[in-house]
Image (spheres, rainbow, N blue to C red):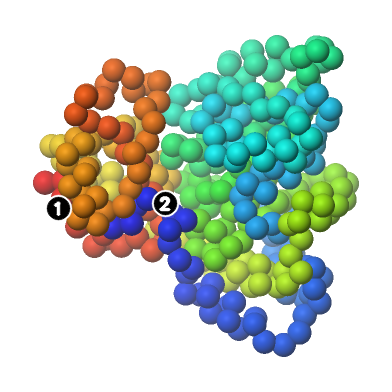
Amino acid sequence: MFFASDNWAGAHPKVAERLHASAAGFSRAYGDGDLDKAVYARFSEIFERDVAVFFVATGTAANSLSLAAYGKPGGISFAHREAHILEDECGAPEYFSHGSRLHPVDGPLGRIDIGNLERAVARFAGENVHGGRPAAISITQASEVGTVYGLDDISAIAAVAKRHGMPLHMDGARFANALVSLDVSPAEMTWKRGVDIVSFGGTKNGCWCAEAIVMFDLDRAREMAFLRKRSAQLFSKARFISAQFAAYFDGGLWLETARHANAMSARLAQAIESSSVARLGWQPEANEVFAIIRKDVAEKAQSAGAAFYTWPTPASLLGQIGDDEALYRFVTSFATTSDDIGRFSDLLR
């Protein structure tokens, strides 16, 4: 019953098989091999236009370099207050952007409120040399609390970005989970709605270690090659990243694994809703479930082998959680089984 994180899951067998098959022989290094080029072309097919693709080791690297690609002196990037780039990356985005700042924007359930965004950007729109100037907007899709931005929401945020001459970045650590939740194409969820650059994650969804930066502005992409090298993110044996993405995309595996993870999340939510000792904090929209559970019940479940984390209480739930309760996060993955859900459900009875 491993619900702590989708990072806890291993690699999908088809990804592991492709890695093994790619281990022998020789290939041009640094992303110039035949398999690398085939995967770049596959990304362009998936996004329905020519894109530039840069493999990196981690989501933090993808997010940090994405913002650095559009960095400017005194630049300020706007993101939800609970976004990974603000809460979980140890200052890496600021470091790689040479001291640019991140400005938190509030909004319910992990999504930026458009009114709050307008006011936050307006505060710096005059480009006062003492206060700084707008540089980028970043949204997390799916969000840190398992919710998803609708297409109209993305368009509205993109409109603010364009009006102030900023790019819109999408942190897609759980890109596939959001995509299948909305049931749209990658193009519809990104550049057709005004997104300029994507941190495209595969690691959480069945890959061993596969993250990529996808850029739609090919002229701007020329600079990324140098940013990536300077940040020590250029793989010499890039074919092993390409092998993962090749298997990931083959036959729609990446969508299959995401649908499974989301389905397990929905089943887990149903189990929690039917319990007398737990309730949902809000309805899940991807593969993360947040539940309010009696502390003694949660401790008993953890002692029985269920892995999940206590989560900070958001402002929307203040006053709604009793002293004997706490908020907990559960994350499902391609490796979660119905049996896992059933056994955890039994612990809540």
Q: Amino acid type of disc 1? A: Asp
Please name the residue shown 63% across and 40% down the image: 170
Residue 321 visible? The answer is yes
- On the image, the x and y values in percent for residue 288 come to 39, 44
Q: Quadrant where the N terminus lies?
A: bottom left
- Marker disc for residue 5: 2
- On the image, the x and y values in percent for residue 269 come to 28, 44
* SS at circle 2: loop
**As drawn, which residue projects farthest toward the bottom?**
25
- On the image, the x and y values in percent for residue 190 come to 65, 43
- Marker disc for residue 121: none
Disc 2 versus disc 1: nearer the observer: 2
Lower sequence index among marks 2 and 1: 2
Total marks drawn? 2
25 vs 80, left or right, is right
Q: Which residue is mark 1?
A: 346
- On the image, the x and y values in percent for residue 150 come to 53, 35
Using the image as rendered, state which of residue 255 and residue 342 is in the foreground: 342
